[in-house]
Amino acid sequence: MNEKAWIDYLPLGSIVILKGGVQKIVINARGLVTAATTPAGYFDYGGSLYPQGIVGDQILYFNHCDIAKVVFEGYTDDDDKMMVDNINEWYTNSDFERIDTAEWNRKRRQESGEYRG
């Protein structure tokens, strides 16, 4: 098993812009395992477009390394720090691997016929 990086997760409510993007995204969740990948995989964050928020069941999955800019950092306290430690501890001891979002998005575009590379 590869060594898993310990992440200094941003607080819930933080607003970020992802690499290659211009749209603001608000962080709604941290430490997500999803069956949207095969096999099931791990993402650092789940978010939604800002200011729209969650529309239907649309969640944007991304990792800490995908963040280009932090526009606003959400509220944090000792409980949040404890939660970040818990997420990191759980992930470090899990069998899940962090999904490479660029590769995952490329595969999804190929499967849908959008990618011609």
Image (spheres, helix red, strand yellow):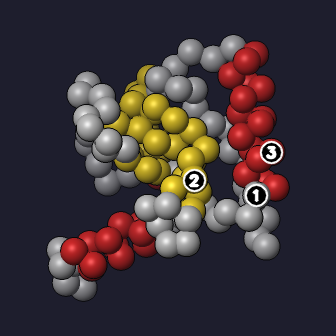
Q: Which mark is residue 33?
A: 2
| Three-letter code for the amino acid on which mark 2 is drawn | Val
Which structural element holds mark 2? strand
For the residues labelled 3 and 2, the Cα–Cα distance comes to 14 Å
| Three-letter code for the amino acid on which mark 1 is drawn | Ser
Q: Residue at x 50, y 72 (%)?
A: 38
Residue at far bottom of view: 117
The reply, left or right, for residue 46 in relation to residue 9 is left
Labels 1 and 2 touching (C-beta < 8 A)? yes
Instruction: Note whether 35 is above or below 12 in the view shown.
Output: below
Q: Residue at x 52, y 20 (%)?
A: 74
Q: Nearer the viewer, residue 44 or 93?
A: 93
| Three-letter code for the amino acid on which mark 3 is drawn | Glu
**Numbered circles on residues, count:** 3
Residue on which the image places disc 3: 89
Residue on which the image places disc 1: 94
Labels 1 and 3 touching (C-beta < 8 A)? no
For the residues labelled 1 and 2, the Cα–Cα distance comes to 10 Å
Which structural element holds mark 3? helix
Q: Compare marks 1 and 2 and give the one earlier in the sequence.
A: 2
Q: Residues within 10 Å of mark 3 (few under 14, many from 20)?
A: few
For the residues labelled 1 and 3, the Cα–Cα distance comes to 9 Å
